[in-house]
Image: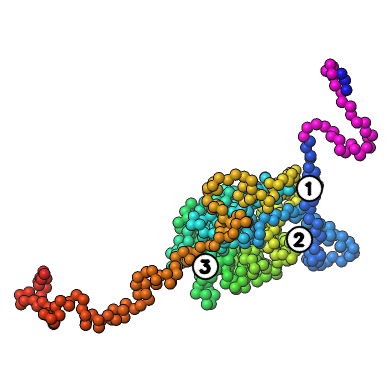
Amino acid sequence: MADSDSDDYWVQEPELAPNDPMRNFMPTSFGKTSKEANIAAQIEQTRRKVEIPQKEIKEKKAASDSDSNSDSDDDDDDSESDEEDEAARFPVSHEVVFTTHDRAVTSIALDPAGARMLTGSLDGTIKFHDFSSMTPTTLRAFKSVDPWGSNKSGSTDSHPIQHIEFSRHSGGAFLCVTAHPQAKIMSRDGDVLTEFVKGDMYLRDMNHTKGHVGEVTTGTWHPTDQNFCITAGSDSTLRIWDVNNKRSQKEVIVFKSKAPGCAGRTRMTAVAWGAPPSGGAPVIVSAALDGSLVMYSGNGPFSRPAAEIRDAHKADTWTGGIDISSDGRMVVTRGGDGLIKLWDTRKFKQPLVKVEHPSTSDRYPMSNIKYSPDSSSIIAGSASGHLHILNPGNLRPEHVTPITPGVPLIVVDWHERLNQIITGSANSETHVLYNPEKSHRGALEVMSRAPKVRHIDDDPSAIMDQSSGISGDAIVAPGALGGTKRGGVTASGKSRDPMRPQMQTITPFMRSQPDAKHISENIPLSKMLHEDPREALLKYADAAKKDPMFTNAWAKTQPVTQYAETSDGEGGEGPDRKRVKR
């Protein structure tokens, strides 16, 4: 070091060889250093290591031209190359998995922009996922909402989520259908905007009811007008609603079943509202539990269907999947009888094509089937956990890939703007399939970000309530939670303090039913509640005759009771007789 009087200083540095291992522990620069993420490696980690199923290759060989008599080796090479080309056509090469539910995922919805994904489950909750705020290490929902968990009456009832769907023209609201007679319109943040009214269950004629009187099974939006939606119920009706009027439906469509022994009523299991063909009106197609398939014109009248097919699927099997092509001409249905059928709305009498397909609607009625955005393919799940991509003309599988092997694949969806396929399985997993070359944003955008450094506050099981966004060490004033948490107990009555004993739940019956012994001892004449009034009075008839209480003063002077007699002038008969005043 130089002298203290001098302004120049020099620091002696250790002299290390270029290949000295100690150089790995020495800083190369001052200040905060940033670590660049390897985006390509992150995307490569999400690649699905799944081989092409041999069954698909065999089906492709059977569907090939019959005049292929060339060398077998050349045929094998050509078929394998064709399989690889077809697999590259669909966005299924990579996947991102979300495990945010506790039970089976029964419904999936994405807004038109593809920025927000909602998932519904049998656990009665809707999970909100925002692709713009997630990273490869924070694949979780930022909000959890129970549509029936915040009633004004304080009820803690919860119903499984049957169907959720964003409006086709606006991402500000979505339709929420639960196992309840009332459907709801909710905002993209989970607030209830409209709760449709429940009908009068004592009215026999469904045309006079203002809402569903039974459980709502599913619903969908109008293809062109964002102010209207339609719901299907177990009361044998389809109801068209105006989202601005929750007091009554706009139109009620009553389906009269012709099946024997059902009194003209059945359960509507699925409904689809298709876009209008060129120069035509929108089309409403619905399936019923008695196996019927009915079609209505979207503009009415709805007194009778425009076309009806009896025994379209096997009766008493749940046809949960139905969809209409983008041009509104083709309809595909997936029944509980293990068949997928293709119909033409212009000749709505017999199916054009039908193929066998394992059904899951016996256990999960929400099982669906979907057209691709351009109607060039049809996707559906299966009981074996495979995703089937079918040809829309002959319903033959173009690509089959396992998603959750051995676990039923319940719901599927193909987003138009993202070009990504989203699936929901019975093991509570949500898979987002994409292709880095063909997909846009969504899961690809999530995997293109640098991973977030894990912190203890990021562990929901440690000190973070992810659904409420409250940290365990945060200071919460009494009453600041707005009634979502009462006192020191949860909604079920259990204490949040693990050392505090659980308090006995006081039910309304316990509060209003005192002890019978206490009533008989402390309340006078309480035994008379269980006696016949006539017998109780006749019990004192003999005692009243022997010892009268009120007429005892005239017992000797007037032993026989005398009644007043009217005079001759007062006893005249006729309508003009006046009443004697006494």
Q: Name the secondary structure under disc 2.
A: strand
Residue 457 visible to an observer of this rendering: yes
Q: Nearer the viewer, residue 346 or 405?
A: 405
Colour scheme of the rendered structure:
rainbow
* Numbered range of the magenta stretch: 4-32
Residue 506 magenta: no
**Which quarter of the image is occupied by the N terminus?**
top right
Give residue 130's position: percent from left, percent from top. 65, 48
Q: Nearer the viewer, residue 414 or 199?
A: 199
Residue at the limit of the structure toward the top, as seen here: 5
Q: Name the secondary structure under disc 1.
A: helix
Q: Assess whether mark 3 and mark 1 are in contact (beta carbons under 8 angstroms).
A: no
Q: Which residue is mark 3?
A: 236
Quarter-wise, where is residue 523 in the image?
Answer: bottom left
Q: Which residue is mark 1?
A: 42
Q: Which residue is mark 2?
A: 401
Give whichever of discs 1 and 3 has the lower sequence position.
1
Q: From the viewer's perspective, is 459 left or right of 162?
A: right
The residue drawn where x is 27% and y is 80% is 540
Residue 65 visible to an observer of this rendering: no
Q: Which secondary structure class fits the magenta region best? A: loop
The residue drawn where x is 11% and y is 69% is 582
Residue 248 disc label: none
Give residue 442's position: percent from left, percent from top. 69, 48
The type of residue carrying mark 3 is: Ser
Give whichever of discs 1 and 2 has the lower sequence position.
1
The type of residue carrying mark 2 is: Thr
